[in-house]
C-alpha cells in the first residue's frame, strides 16, 4: 500500500468527523472537563489547566498503548507498553488496532459519562516501507467526535539490536488547541495554544526472559518535559508498566491474549491502572 493511501484516509476521517462535530456543537457541552458529579462531592479534572493538553493526556493512541510491538513491528505480548507516552517500537505490516480507554476523575472506579472522565477511542494502522514502520491514528477524543491525527515513524533495526528509535507527532493538525493564561476555554475545553506535539523516543530491550523494556524521550508542547516508561512481562499474558508522563506517575497492568492462531489471529487486550497513582484508568482493544 502506498504511503499516501492511509494518510488520505486519516485526513478524510478527520474531515468527516469534524463536520459532524460542528453540527453537534448546538447540543449540551461537557466533553471531558466537567468538575462536579451533581452530588456533594466535586470531581476535579486532573488534566485541566493552562498548557494541560487535556485531549492527549489520556492513552497515547500510538503503538505501546494497549498492545506491545517488537522491534520489527509485529504485535507481541513481549513488546514495550506505556499508557500516555510513546515508545519507539511501531506497528507495521498492514495491521490495524482498535482501542479505547477512560481516564476517570474518580479515585476508585471508572465513570463512563463524559462529564467525569476523559476518554478516547482510536483506530491505529501500521504499514511497513523498506526499513521503516509507520503508524497512522485517528483518535476520537469526545462526544463531539473531535478527532485528532497522530503519526509515528520507526527505523527497523536488525533483530539482534536491542535499541530502537522513533519519532512522531500527536494532534498533527492542531485540532484541539490547549488553554494558555488569559484564554476562555470553549465548550470543548479548547484554547489558543498549539497542541501539535512532536517527539523523539528511544526504547531499549534488556533481553531478559521477562522482556524488560525501557523507553525515554522528549519533544515540544505536550512532550516538552522528558518522559520515561518501563514495562515487564510478569507472565505470558500480563505486563506490568509504569511511566512518568511529564505530569506525574502512571502505573498499571495490561492483559494480552489472542483469538485465533497465526498471523490471522486477533490480539485482544485489557488495561487497568492509575494515573498519578490516584485516578482510575481502564482500557480495552482488539487487533483487526
Image: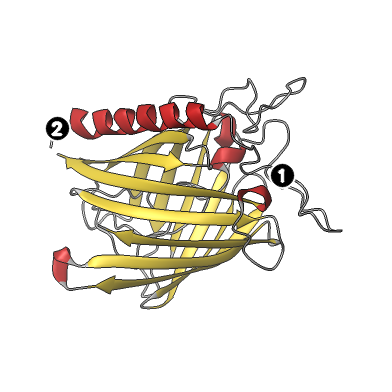
Q: Which residue is mark 1?
A: 34
Which residue is depicted at the point 58% across and 44% down? 57
State the residue in front, 262 or 28: 28
The answer to which of marks 1 and 2 sits earlier in the sequence is: 2
- Element at badge 1? loop
Q: Which dot, 1 or 2, sits closer to the camera?
A: 1
Q: Tell me if 266 is positioned left or right of 44 in this view.
A: left
- In the picture as drawn, the residue positioned furthest to the right comes out as 40
Rendered residue at 32%/28% (across/down):
11
The residue where tag 2 is placed is 2
* In the displayed structure image, the side of residue 102 where residue 124 appears, left or right: left
Instruction: Name the residue: 82% across, 58% down.
Output: 39
Residue 225 appears in which quarter of the rendering? top right
Residue 71 in percent (x, y) is at 28, 54
Q: Is residue 9 above or below residue 164?
A: above
* Res 13 → quadrant: top left
Question: 274 or 38, which is in the foreground?
Answer: 38
Q: Nearer the viewer, residue 37 or 285?
A: 37
Residue at the extreme bottom: 235
Amino acid at each position: 500500500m502506498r504511503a499516501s493511501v492511509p494518510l488520505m484516509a486519516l485526513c478524510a476521517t478527520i474531515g468527516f468527523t469534524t463536520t459532524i462535530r460542528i453540527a453537534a456543537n448546538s447540543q449540551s457541552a461537557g466533553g471531558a472537563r466537567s468538575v462536579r458529579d451533581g452530588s456533594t462531592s466535586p470531581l476535579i479534572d486532573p488534566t485541566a489547566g493552562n498548557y494541560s493538553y487535556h485531549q492527549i493526556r489520556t492513552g497515547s493512541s500510538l503503538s505501546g498503548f494497549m498492545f506491545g510491538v517488537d522491534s520489527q513491528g509485529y504485535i507481541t505480548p513481549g513488546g514495550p507498553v506505556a499508557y500516555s507516552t510513546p515508545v519507539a517500537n511501531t506497528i507495521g505490516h498492514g495491521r490495524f488496532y482498535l482501542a479505547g480507554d477512560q481516564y476517570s476523575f474518580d479515585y476508585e472506579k471508572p465513570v463512563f459519562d463524559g462529564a467525569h472522565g476523559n476518554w478516547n477511542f482510536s483506530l491505529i494502522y501500521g504499514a511497513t516501507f523498506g526499513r521503516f514502520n509507520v503508524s497512522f491514528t485517528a483518535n476520537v477524543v469526545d462526544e463531539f467526535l473531535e478527532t485528532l491525527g497522530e503519526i509515528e515513524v520507526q527505523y527497523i533495526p536488525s533483530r539482534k539490536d536491542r535499541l530502537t528509535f522513533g519519532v512522531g507527532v500527536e494532534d498533527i493538525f492542531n485540532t484541539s488547541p490547549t488553554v494558555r493564561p488569559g484564554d476562555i476555554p470553549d465548550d470543548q475545553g479548547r484554547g489558543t495554544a498549539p497542541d501539535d506535539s512532536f517527539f523523539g523516543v528511544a526504547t531499549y530491550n534488556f533481553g531478559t526472559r521477562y522482556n524488560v523494556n525501557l523507553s525515554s524521550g522528549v519533544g515540544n508542547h505536550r512532550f516538552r518535559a522528558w518522559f520515561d516508561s518501563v514495562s515487564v512481562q510478569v507472565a505470558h499474558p500480563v505486563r506490568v508498566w509504569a511511566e512518568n508522563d511529564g505530569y506525574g506517575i502512571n502505573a498499571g497492568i495490561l492483559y494480552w491474549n489472542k483469538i485465533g492462531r497465526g498471523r490471522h489471529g486477533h490480539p485482544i487486550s485489557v488495561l487497568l491502572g492509575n494515573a498519578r497513582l490516584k485516578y482510575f484508568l481502564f482500557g480495552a482493544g482488539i487487533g483487526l
